[in-house]
C-alpha cells in the first residue's frame, strides 16, 4: 500500500467514524428531547382524560335526572 492509498483509507475511516458519532449524537438528542417532554405529554393526556370523563359523567347525570 503506497502513501496515497493509505491516506485515502485513513480519510474513509475518519469520515465513517465522524458520520457514526454525529448520527449517535443526533439520536441521543432526540431521545433526550423525548425524555424531557414525556412528563408534559403525560400531563396533557391526564387533563384530556379528566375532561372527557367529566363530560361523559355530566351527560350521564343529565340523562339520569330527566327520567
Image: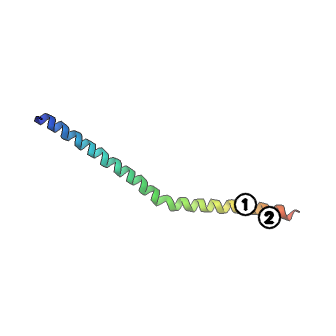
Q: For mark 1, what is the residue? A: 55
42 vs 1, nearest the viewer: 1
Relative placement, left or right, of 2 versus 28 is left
**How packed is label 2: few (under 14 Cα within 10 Å), some, or many (20 or more)?**
few
* Identity of the residue drawn at 15% across and 34% down: 5
* Identity of the residue drawn at 25% across and 42% down: 15
Relative placement, left or right, of 43 versus 10 is right
Q: Check disc 1 and report its element: helix, strand or loop.
A: helix
Which sits earlier in the primary sequence, circle 1 or circle 2? 1
Residue 4: % across, % down: 13, 34
Relative placement, left or right, of 7 versus 49 is left
Q: Quadrant of the C terminus?
A: bottom right
Q: Check disc 2 and report its element: helix, strand or loop.
A: helix
Residue 52: % across, % down: 68, 59
Residue 66: % across, % down: 87, 62
Q: Quadrant of the N terminus?
A: top left
Tag 1–tag 2 contact (CB < 8 Å): no
* Identity of the residue drawn at 71% across and 63% down: 54
Q: For mark 2, what is the residue? A: 61
Residue 16: % across, % down: 27, 42
* Identity of the residue drawn at 35% across and 51% down: 25
Q: CA distance from mark 1 to mark 2?
A: 10 Å
Is 4 rendered above or below residue 52? above
Per the rendering, the mark at residue 10 is none
- Residue at the farthest left position: 2
Colouring chosen for the image of the structure: rainbow
Amino acid at each position: 500500500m503506497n502513501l496515497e492509498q493509505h491516506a485515502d483509507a485513513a480519510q474513509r475511516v475518519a469520515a465513517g467514524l465522524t458520520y457514526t458519532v454525529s448520527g449517535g449524537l443526533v439520536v441521543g438528542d432526540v431521545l433526550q428531547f423525548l425524555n424531557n417532554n414525556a412528563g408534559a405529554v403525560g400531563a396533557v393526556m391526564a387533563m384530556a382524560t379528566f375532561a372527557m370523563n367529566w363530560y361523559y359523567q355530566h351527560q350521564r347525570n343529565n340523562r339520569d335526572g330527566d327520567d
